[in-house]
Image (cartoon, grey):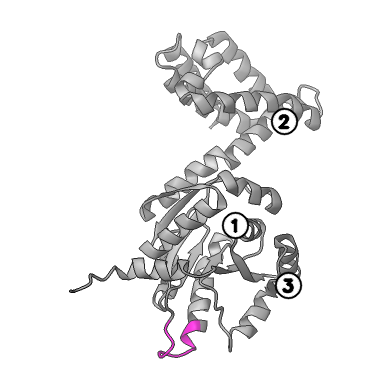
């Protein structure tokens, strides 16, 4: 009786899952260290950490809290001339601009082993939100399954970030075996995953930027405006945070159109005029530009707010005047 063979991708994933997963992490900054902490708690074995400087790698190893070989990039290059990483999974958690060069460098290290030593049943993932798995193509040519796994959270601190990973969403794309392993990782960390088309990654990442770093920048503008009202920065932050939190609570249960409140939804054109005059008097160009853009979007969400056309004309005049 003939036995139907499973696909190479399924076989590759199955072989990886059959043993305790060992992980090498290249890039021991906030993201790489957060992954190391989270994966170790989830039962993964972190066997190698590489950072630009040895000091950073050793600090990350201490936070992860298990026996880890911690190397600087220079030490790693010397080591891998004779002993390439043996872990089943390599995570590249470096700045986006160096991912491709690291992939080329790793591929050269594995190529040096010769054609009789191909890579089998191993995966490499990068954590960039904007770049596709394709930047790792040199490693696919050496036998790796390649993919990207991006945590959709803000990581400003490694230890806090590791906790945030437990309820993060992770975007995935790449080879089938890499996506399967990434989905398993996301689940083991306590989060949820979703796949995305490689071509959509820049737009996806721009959306993430708008929702997190963009919100932080907008918050800073609001803080500066209150500082110009006579408050300290610390006091301004404390005053604004409950407002931000209440907005997020509304967005948890309502779509943006229903969650929107305030001046534009009510169509208070006299208030809009006062706002614009006050901002212009302070010569806060970034605040004025943000106000105009967000005002237009608020009107679009409001669905025929009172005075909508008049407010739009007012915003357009101000925008042209400040250009």
Residue sitting nearer the eye, 212 or 167: 167
User: Considering the numbered disc 1 on the image, is that residue within a helix, a strand or a loop?
Assistant: loop
Name the foreground residue: 229 vs 247. Answer: 247
| Mark 1 vs mark 2: in front | 1
> As drawn, is 33 to the left or to the right of 239?
left
For the residues marked 1 and 2, what is the alpha-carbon distance in whole angstroms? Answer: 42 Å
Bounds of the magenta span? 110-118
Q: Residues within 10 Å of mark 2 (few under 14, many from 20)?
A: some
Q: How many marks?
A: 3
Q: Main secondary structure of the magenta part?
A: loop
Query: How far apart are labels 3 and 2 at the CA level?
Result: 39 Å
Name the foreground residue: 192 vs 71.
192
Marks 3 and 1, the one that precedes in the sequence = 1
Callouts 3 and 2 close, C-beta under 8 Å:
no
Image quadrant holding the N terminus, namely bottom left
Q: Which residue is mark 1?
A: 42
* Circle 3 SS class: helix
Q: Specify whether residue 205 is painted magenta.
A: no
Q: Which residue is mark 3?
A: 54
Q: Give residue 113's position: percent from left, percent from top.
A: 49, 89
The CA span between labels 3 and 1 is 26 Å
Is the residue 91 above or below the residue 184 in the image?
Answer: below
In this rendering, does residue 88 appear at all?
A: yes
Residue drawn at (47%, 25%) of the image: 256
Tell me: 190 left or right of 238: left
Residue at numbered disc 2: 224
Marks 3/1 in contact by CB < 8 Å: the verdict is: no
Q: Please provide percent x and percent y for residue 276.
A: 60, 19
Q: Quadrant of the rendered structure where residue 305 is? A: top left
- Point out the tag, 1 or 2, that comes first from the N-terminus: 1
Residue found at x 54% / y 17%: 261
């Amino acid at each position: 009786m003939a036995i139907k063979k499973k696909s190479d991708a399924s076989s590759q994933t199955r072989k990886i899952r059959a043993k305790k997963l060992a992980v090498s992490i290249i890039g021991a900054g906030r993201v790489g260290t957060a992954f190391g902490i989270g994966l170790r708690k989830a039962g993964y074995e972190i066997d190698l950490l590489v950072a630009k400087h040895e000091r950073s790698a050793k600090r990350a190893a201490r936070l992860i809290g298990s026996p880890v070989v911690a190397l600087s990039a220079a030490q790693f290059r010397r080591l891998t001339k004779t002993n390439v990483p043996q872990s089943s999974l390599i995570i590249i958690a470096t700045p986006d601009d160096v991912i491709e060069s690291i992939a080329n460098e790793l591929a050269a290290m594995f190529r040096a082993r010769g054609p009789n030593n191909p890579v089998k049943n191993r995966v490499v993932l990068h954590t960039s939100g904007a770049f596709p798995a394709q930047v790792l193509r040199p490693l696919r040519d050496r036998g790796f399954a390649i993919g990207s796994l991006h945590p959709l959270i803000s990581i400003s601190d490694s230890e806090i970030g590791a906790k945030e990973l437990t309820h993060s969403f992770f975007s995935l794309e790449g080879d089938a075996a890499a996506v399967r392993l990434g989905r398993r990782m996301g689940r083991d960390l306590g989060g949820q995953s979703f796949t995305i088309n490689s071509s959509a990654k820049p737009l996806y990442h721009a959306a993430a930027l708008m929702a997190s770093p963009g919100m932080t920048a907008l918050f800073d503008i609001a803080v500066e405006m209150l500082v110009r009202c006579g408050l300290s920065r610390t006091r301004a932050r404390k005053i604004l945070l409950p407002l931000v939190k209440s907005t997020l609570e509304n967005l948890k249960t309502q779509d943006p159109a229903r969650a929107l409140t305030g001046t534009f939804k009510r169509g208070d054109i006299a208030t809009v005029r006062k706002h614009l005059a006050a901002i212009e008097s302070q010569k806060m160009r970034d605040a004025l530009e943000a106000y105009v853009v967000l005002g237009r979007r608020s009107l679009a969400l409001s669905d025929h707010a009172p005075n909508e056309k008049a407010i739009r004309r007012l915003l357009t005049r101000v925008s042209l005047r400040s250009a």
